[in-house]
Image (cartoon, rainbow, N blue to C red):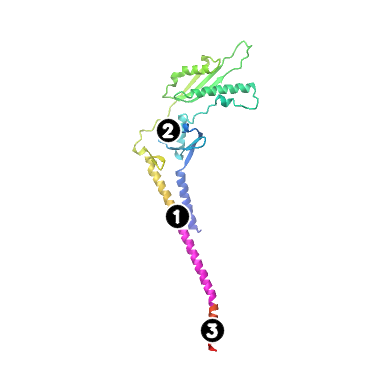
Amino acid sequence: MDRGKRIKWKLVFMLLTFLLSGCGTTTLFNNLEETEINEMIAILKQYGISTTKVIGKESCALLIANENFSTAIDLLGAHGYPLPKYQTLGDVFKKSGLVSSPLEERVRFMNALSEGIALTLSKIPGVLKSRVHVVLPENDPYAEKMVPSSAAVFLAYRQDSMVEDYVREIKYLVTNSIEGLEFDKVTVSLFPVTLPPLPKALGKSDTMCSIIGIEMTEASKMQFFMLLGVLIAIIIILLISMLWMVMVANRKKKEKEIKVENLAEATDMPLTMSGTAGQKEESLD
């Protein structure tokens, strides 16, 4: 392959790389439940960001265009996604063949209580994230002064919700979930979160449309067709180049066959001429 052909194939490869990188997608999240993936898709769709859901055997993944990756992370993080993973009592107290010390059992029990209460609080409408820290001091039954149990609750909630109106109910819930805990020993800390504003009403140029199963905005439709046209042009160029190479190879093959035939005829000529001369001498005699 000469230098001109090498340059041509390099240019084609560069165009293909650019095209694929422009249409590339990135895995935003994976190993999540389909319900959670659907909620994330609904949130991003409100902001005009299209995504692709990939369903696996036991979990799902969410794919997104490279240029929307950072924006999607910020938006979903503001809405509390992906949802925190809380451990249940069954997760904490898994059956094990090893013997645990009393201290390890106590720590695991406190962790199970904290995770279970945090999971319950996360179901309150408007709560984005919840954490609970439980302190259960190991008091000596013969001590003169007993150290009371305590709990601290952290809640990050949507500012437009009414979570702050339910602080008393939250404290009662935590108090009744932990044995020996008093109402005054529960602290609830609330942190409002302002969500990013929704985009303006979608106009004609920003309405969503679907082309061969791919969701996109009207504004990006022209770019999609341009990229599709470039891809078709590259495929046509490749086909023409392959056809031209096949034709050149066939032509060279035919020229080689013709040269071989000419060489064979040139080799047989002396023998034919000598035979003709012998016949002429015999006729003279």
Position of residue 228 measured from the top left corner of the image (x, y, whole percent)? 41, 47
Question: What is the C-alpha distance between the residues marked 3 and 2?
Answer: 101 Å
- Residue at horizontal 44%, vertical 56%? 240
- Disc 2 secondary structure class: helix
Residue nearer the viewer, 17 or 183? 183
Q: Could you tell me if the residues under marks 3 and 1 are in contact, i.e. CB atoms within 8 Å?
A: no
Amino acid at the residue labelled 3: Gln
Question: What is the C-alpha distance between the residues marked 1 and 2?
Answer: 42 Å
Is residue 259 part of the magenta span, yes or no?
A: yes
- Magenta part mainly helix, strand or loop? helix
Where does label 2 land, which residue?
42
Which span of residues is magenta-colored? 240-269
Q: Within 10 angstroms of label 2, few (less than 14), some, or many (20 or more) residues? A: some
- Residue at horizontal 55%, vertical 83%? 278
Q: Within 10 angstroms of label 1, few (less than 14), some, or many (20 or more) residues? A: few
Q: Mark 3 against mark 1, which lies toward the viewer?
A: 3
User: Farthest residue in the bottom direction?
Assistant: 285
- Disc 1 secondary structure class: helix
Which of the labelled discs sits on residue 279, or is there none?
3
- Disc 3 secondary structure class: helix
Amino acid at the residue labelled 2: Ala
- Residue at horizontal 57%, vertical 21%? 110
Residue nearer the viewer, 151 or 36? 36
Q: Does residue 209 sit above or below 244 in this rendering?
A: above
Q: Does residue 92 sit above or below 10 in this rendering?
A: above
Q: Does residue 3 sit above or below 259 in this rendering?
A: above
Amino acid at the residue labelled 1: Leu
Q: Does residue 246 sit above or below 223 in this rendering?
A: below
Quarter of the image where one finds residue 142: top right
Which of the labelled discs sits on residue 239, or is there none?
1
Q: Could you tell me if the residues under marks 3 and 2 are in contact, i.e. CB atoms within 8 Å?
A: no
Q: Mark 3 against mark 2, which lies toward the viewer?
A: 3
